Image (cartoon, rainbow, N blue to C red):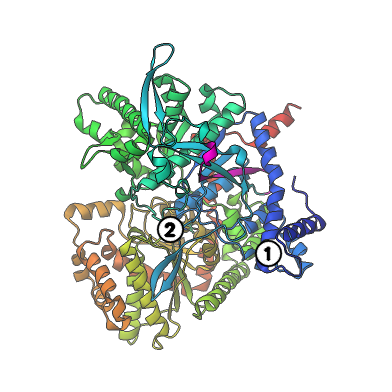
């Protein structure tokens, strides 16, 4: 039980200050932050242990969420809210004239993820613990998270992200008693055991230590705390070598690769595979440490491996942890001496896999040569899994070579590669997509043969976001307004927000709601003025596109629209528009040239437009650097319009769309990912849908897509593309503008030009709605009211019902109470 008073919290904070060689007089804001977070972190350890003990005593089934990324964001404010200690912390600091809000701003975001996939993992841990479902998150303890972004001459530059800071990150606890050891490289020995049975044994030639760090995940006001366990790779000390097979540990690789390199950095690619050896080593290191820890917990509680599937399920967040499947097989076969059939049954009943993308460049394939070098035993096991899979395929479709080659885990051309997604489908009892539309496309386009071979294995769980962080924490004004109107249970029952529907047409409530939006816009405007020196008019429409920079997300479609507005302001004397502020935030992967060209183009256009007196405050463009969770928390509550304009069929779900709609931004979107379900929930009249559908895009492709056709049909598009090359945007950007234009006119793989006219028209109609202030307020309020479905609690419930079959801690308490 966390039981704190102002006195006890003060004492603890002062102790931590002293430990850092500070006094209340000498402490700066950073020191106060460190002391506060350390004091709180200390409090959570007791609940972490008691939650774990309760689950073990009652032999509760756990979900183990394996993810290479957890984009958790700042923890102190979130944890204060979940512990219901926000006011107490405020009062405690006030006695030293210290502002809690200033202290919280000192925290850096642990950026241990790229974007949506990592943020989803964080929202799911929050949802699991808040509903008391036994869970452990397993990830990597990167020394450097996602790079920090800044702009120089309007171009993206990157620097290292030292998220732990000088004094270390106060929310993590080292757990040396949980450390593991993991090997790489080497060779496979074939030998006969005492019974004369042929067995295999992997002799590794490089071994590293996996150091366990726990970050506590706190449930919302339920005293449950569960671990996010992150593994850090370290060299094994020379004096520890004797514990290993003496013949191999000094092998070639031990000295060549520095063990700590393995978890040095997060690969900055989003939706794109690079195929680097160190990345494969990261993946295996992550899986090997996590599996050993899962088996330690299971066997340590006195259970047998046969019951692993009853007590543990392992969710693979994309294929990044796919190597866990052959690794569990290896442990069962080589170390615990199970027969293949039984080992495979245990595996198949333990793993479940989430597919996050259909983009071909993001589907992981590892070359046979690389796997053989780094993980020779796993390559053998993968071949055996594939051999048996193809026997099943032959039984189902006799002599069908085509079926064999599409279902095969091994791809032969242009060189032999392992298809990690096929491995995951074969080795899992459930496979889910992340939104209804995406899951349908997974069935129809990606895995139709698997769907026929294994009926009912493919399913859908639509993504969700935690309303604790994405409403209660980031939008306190709206949160307390909602408390007054629907009661205080909404953070755990987001469907309660439906109760504000009747208010959506009441002038008084509309004014209150829009006053809160305005206040949030002022907060963002003040931040922009202070940090970027751009003055914003809060009467303007705040039109927001915040997400990774990727061609398929089509930030360049947004740019074309902006250019078309600018062109018309300059060249059409009677053109009128309501003032708009376009807000971007986006990182491009450092090696993604085209994405960086788009950033450069947006920044150069912004610089010209923002300084053009002829434009006045009709148009402003702000590119907020270093997009991360804390930046999203600032922008989301201030948005009027949410840009979700990916080419239909390419955005698996999106979650930014959910954060923004929940906070009353109106979606301008294509029929893609979860936009489809958002439209169903909020109603077609409360958002703007435009553009080609998946079917229409298929039709265009079949005809042979001709982007120039759309240029010839649209005078505004023709003018806009010409205008891109205007000298006034600066000589430095001409080459990048030309590259973008050339891409659009000659390839346009994401059909930007085909959607341009529809986009411009939808934007015009959005503007008309905005001018009707009562109508707009009603639309915004109905968005907030009807987003209950997109709580991560609902997603977790769907996972529990369809896949995980967990029992909550609370339901055990209820059972016990009923039994007296
Ligand atoms: C929510 C979130 C994302 C995902 O945004 P999409 O619009 O769904 O791509 C990416 N990065 C951060 C920091 C987020 O908070």
Q: Say which residue appears at 23% left-offset and 34% top-offset.
A: 405
Circle 2 residues within 10 Å: few <14, some 14–19, many ≥20: few
Asked if one can make out residue 266 in the rendered structure from this viewpoint, the answer is yes
| Residue 348 drawn at (x, y percent) | 43, 28
Expressed as whole percent of the image width and height from the top left, the position of residue 819 reads 73, 26
Up-down relation of residue 112 to residue 330 (above or below): below
- Tell me the residue that label 1 is attached to: 31
Q: Earlier in the sequence, mark 1 or mark 2?
A: 1
The label shown at residue 684 is 2
In depth, the one of 293 and 569 nearer the eye is 293
In front here: 586 or 253? 253
In the picture provided, is 143 more to the left or to the right than 403?
Answer: right
Mark in the foreground, 1 or 2: 1
Q: Which one is in front, 178 or 625?
A: 178
Can you name the residue that lies furthest to the right here? 7
Instruction: Locate residue 74: give its quadrant.
Output: bottom right
Q: Is residue 487 visible?
A: no
- Mark pair 1, 2: CA separation: 50 Å
Q: Is residue 223 magenta?
A: yes
Question: Which residues fall within the magenta stretch?
Answer: 221-240
- Answer few, some or many: residues within 10 Å of disc 1's Cα (few below 14, many 20 plus, some between 14 and 19): many
Tag 1, which secondary structure? helix
User: Is 351 on the left or on the right of 399, as rendered?
Assistant: right
């Amino acid at each position: 039980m966390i039981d704190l008073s102002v006195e006890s919290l003060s004492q603890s904070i002062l102790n931590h200050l002293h430990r850092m060689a500070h006094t209340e007089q000498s402490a700066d804001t950073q020191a106060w932050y460190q002391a506060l977070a350390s004091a709180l972190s200390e409090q959570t350890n007791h609940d972490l242990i008691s939650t774990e003990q309760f689950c073990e005593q009652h032999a509760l089934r756990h979900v183990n969420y394996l993810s290479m990324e957890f984009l958790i964001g700042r923890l102190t404010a979130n944890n204060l809210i979940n512990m219901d200690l926000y006011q107490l912390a405020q009062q405690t600091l006030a006695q030293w004239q210290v502002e809690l809000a200033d202290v919280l701003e000192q925290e850096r975001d642990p950026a241990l993820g790229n974007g949506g996939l990592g943020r989803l993992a964080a929202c799911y841990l929050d949802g699991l613990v808040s509903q008391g479902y036994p869970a452990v998150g397993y990830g990597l303890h990167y020394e450097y998270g996602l790079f920090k972004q800044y702009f120089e001459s309007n171009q993206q530059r990157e620097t290292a992200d030292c998220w732990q800071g000088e004094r270390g990150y106060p929310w993590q606890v080292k757990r040396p008693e949980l450390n593991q050891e993991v090997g790489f490289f080497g060779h496979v020995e074939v030998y006969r055991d005492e019974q004369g049975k042929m067995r295999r044994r992997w002799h590794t030639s490089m071994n590293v230590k996996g150091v366990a760090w726990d970050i506590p995940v706190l449930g919302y006001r339920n005293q449950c705390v569960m671990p996010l366990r992150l593994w850090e790779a370290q060299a094994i000390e020379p004096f520890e070598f004797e514990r290993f097979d003496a013949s191999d540990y000094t092998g070639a690789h031990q000295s060549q690769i520095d063990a700590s390199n393995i978890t040095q950095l997060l690969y900055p690619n989003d939706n794109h595979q690079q195929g680097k050896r160190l990345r494969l080593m990261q993946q295996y290191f992550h899986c090997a440490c996590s599996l050993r820890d899962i088996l330690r917990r299971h066997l340590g509680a006195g259970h047998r491996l046969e019951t692993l599937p009853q007590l543990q399920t392992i969710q693979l967040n994309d294929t990044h942890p796919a190597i866990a499947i052959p690794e569990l097989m290896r442990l069962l076969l080589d170390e615990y001496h199970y027969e293949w059939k039984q080992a495979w049954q245990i595996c198949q009943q333990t793993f479940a896999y989430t597919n996050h993308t259909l983009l071909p460049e993001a589907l992981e394939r590892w070359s046979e040569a690389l796997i053989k070098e780094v993980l020779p035993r796993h390559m053998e096991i993968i071949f055996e899994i594939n051999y048996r899979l193809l026997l099943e395929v032959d039984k189902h479709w006799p002599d069908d070579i085509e079926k064999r080659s599409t279902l095969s885990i091994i791809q032969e051309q242009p060189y032999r590669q392992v298809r990690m997604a096929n491995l995951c489908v074969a080795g899992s009892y459930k496979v889910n997509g992340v939104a209804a539309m995406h899951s349908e496309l997974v069935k129809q386009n990606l895995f139709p043969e698997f769907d026929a071979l294994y009926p009912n294995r493919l399913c859908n769980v639509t993504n969700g976001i935690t309303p604790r962080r994405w409403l209660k924490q980031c939008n306190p004004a709206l949160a307390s307004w909602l408390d007054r109107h629907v009661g205080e249970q909404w953070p755990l029952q987001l469907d309660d927000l439906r109760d504000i529907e009747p208010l959506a047409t009441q002038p008084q409530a509309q004014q209150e709601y829009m006053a809160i939006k305005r206040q949030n816009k002022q907060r963002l405007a003040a931040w922009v003025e202070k940090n970027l020196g751009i003055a914003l008019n809060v009467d303007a429409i705040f039109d927001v596109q915040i997400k990774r920079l990727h061609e398929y997300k089509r930030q360049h479609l947004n740019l074309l629209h902006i250019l078309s507005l600018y062109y018309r302001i300059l060249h059409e004397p009677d053109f009128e528009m309501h003032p708009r502020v376009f807000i971007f935030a986006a990182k491009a992967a450092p090696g993604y040239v085209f994405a960086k060209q788009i950033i450069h183009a947006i920044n150069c256009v912004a610089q010209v437009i923002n300084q053009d007196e002829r434009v006045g405050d009709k148009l402003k463009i702000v590119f907020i650097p270093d997009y991360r969770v804390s930046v999203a928390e600032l922008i989301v509550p201030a948005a009027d319009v949410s840009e979700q304009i990916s080419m239909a069929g390419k955005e698996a779900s999106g979650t930014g769309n959910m954060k923004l709609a929940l906070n009353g931004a109106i979606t301008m979107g294509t029929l893609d990912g979860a936009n489809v379900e958002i439209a169903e929930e909020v109603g077609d009249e409360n958002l703007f849908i435009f553009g080609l559908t998946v079917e229409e895009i298929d039709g265009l492709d079949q005809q042979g897509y001709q982007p120039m056709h759309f240029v010839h049909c649209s005078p505004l598009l023709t003018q806009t593309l010409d205008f891109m090359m205007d000298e006034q945007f600066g000589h430095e950007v001409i080459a990048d503008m030309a590259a973008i234009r050339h891409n659009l006119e000659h390839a346009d793989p994401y059909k930007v030009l085909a959607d341009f006219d529809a986009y411009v028209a939808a934007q015009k109609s959005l503007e008309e709605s905005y001018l009707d202030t009562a109508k707009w307020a009603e639309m915004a309020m109905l968005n907030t009211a009807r987003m209950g479905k997109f709580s991560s609690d609902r997603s977790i419930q769907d996972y529990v019902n369809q896949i995980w079959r967990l029992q909550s801690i609370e339901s055990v308490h209820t059972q016990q109470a009923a039994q007296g």
